[in-house]
Amino acid sequence: MPVRGVVPALTLTATATLTPAITDAAGSTTALDPVVATARGWAVPWAALLALALLAAAVVTAAVRRRRRRARSAEREAARVRDAVERALRDQEASAR
């Protein structure tokens, strides 16, 4: 069951103190020594983990897109250079004739 108002911080520690009281037949109460118990539990910050996963996915996606864009740009530049060299060679052959 979720606990409201507690920030998930991976592990939480809680301490409870119980002071028992005994009521006798006359109606008077007597306090006994308090009992103290401490417990630990996991509190996984799911929202923070989801945000971290989304941020990591965005960074990876941006890096992959940038790499692909640079590769396409390099391919286009290589094609332009190849076409320019072919045109220059054709023009040189035509003027030599």
Image (spheres, rainbow, N blue to C red):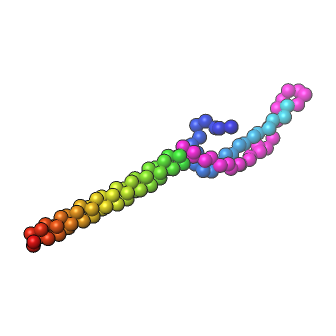
Question: Which residue is located at x 48 percent, y 47 percent?
Answer: 54
Q: Residue 54 lies in magenta, yes or no?
A: no
Give residue 50's position: percent from left, percent from top. Answer: 53, 46
- The answer to whether one can see residue 87 in this image is yes
Q: Camera-side residue: 26 or 91?
A: 91
Rendered-image quadrant of the C terminus: bottom left
- The answer to whether one can see residue 12 in this image is no
With 29 as the anchor, is 71 left or right in this view? left
Rendered-image quadrant of the N terminus: top right
Give residue 61's position: percent from left, percent from top. Answer: 43, 52
Question: Which residue is located at x 62 percent, y 50 percent?
Answer: 11
Report which quarter residue 66 is drawn in.
bottom left
Q: Which residues are magenta?
A: 24-48
Q: Check the image and report above or below for 91 versus 52.
A: below
Q: Camera-side residue: 70 or 93?
A: 93
Q: Residue furthest right?
A: 25
Give residue 85's position: percent from left, percent from top. Answer: 20, 67
